[in-house]
Image (tube, rainbow, N blue to C red):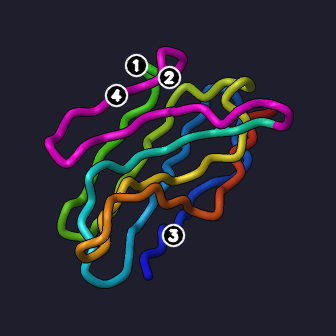
């Protein structure tokens, strides 16, 4: 069984920074892609940033220049550094992984979610 464990959410003032972490753990799995989505009540979950095993990274237009996604391959961990936070960044942030476990087809895995609130 594979799990994605998140940490780092919280309350921050506009203009502030937060860093989210997500670690994948389990047995016999490989990572095709990992990243972060976010969701606010009544809206669809949207991609924030994601990186592939080949090293390419994509960002939502709304976070380009403010958020940086990095990864630690040895620890199967991705980090989302969020700077210059705005109230509209307030959302539940979900770690996402497109992982292959053993010989099974790759599948979407999700973390439990962590709340980010940007407010004065």
Query: Separation of disc 2 and disc 4 at Cα?
Result: 10 Å
- CA separation, marks 1 and 4? 12 Å
> Could you say where residue 91 lies in the image, as x and y percent from the top left?
72, 39
Q: Is residue 68 above or below residue 100?
A: above
Image vertical order of residue 109 relative to residue 75, above or below: above
Distance, label 4 to label 3, CA atoms, is: 21 Å
Name the disc covering residue 58, or none: 4
Q: Quadrant of residue 37?
A: top right
Mark 4 or 3, nearer chain start: 3
Mark 2 vs mark 3: in front: 3
Residue 62: x and y in percent read 54, 17
N-term-proximal mark, 1 vs 4: 4
Asked where in the image residue 58 lies, by quadrant, the reply is top left
The residue segment tinted magenta is: 41-62
- Residue underneath mark 2: 63
Q: Residue at x 70, y 41 (%)?
A: 12
Disc ID at residue 65: 1
Contact? badges 1 and 3 (CB < 8 Å): no
């Amino acid at each position: 069984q594979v799990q994605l464990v998140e940490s780092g959410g919280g309350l921050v003032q506009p203009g502030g920074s937060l860093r989210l972490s997500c670690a994948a753990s389990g047995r016999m799995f490989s990572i095709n892609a990992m990243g972060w989505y976010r969701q606010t009540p009544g809206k669809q979950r949207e991609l924030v940033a994601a990186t592939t095993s080949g090293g390419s990274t994509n960002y939502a237009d709304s976070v380009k220049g403010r958020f940086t996604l990095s990864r630690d391959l040895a620890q199967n961990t991705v980090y989302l550094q969020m700077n210059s936070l705005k109230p509209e960044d307030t959302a539940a942030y979900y770690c996402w992984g497109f992982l292959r476990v053993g010989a099974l087809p790759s599948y979407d895995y999700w973390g439990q979610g962590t709340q980010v609130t940007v407010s004065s």
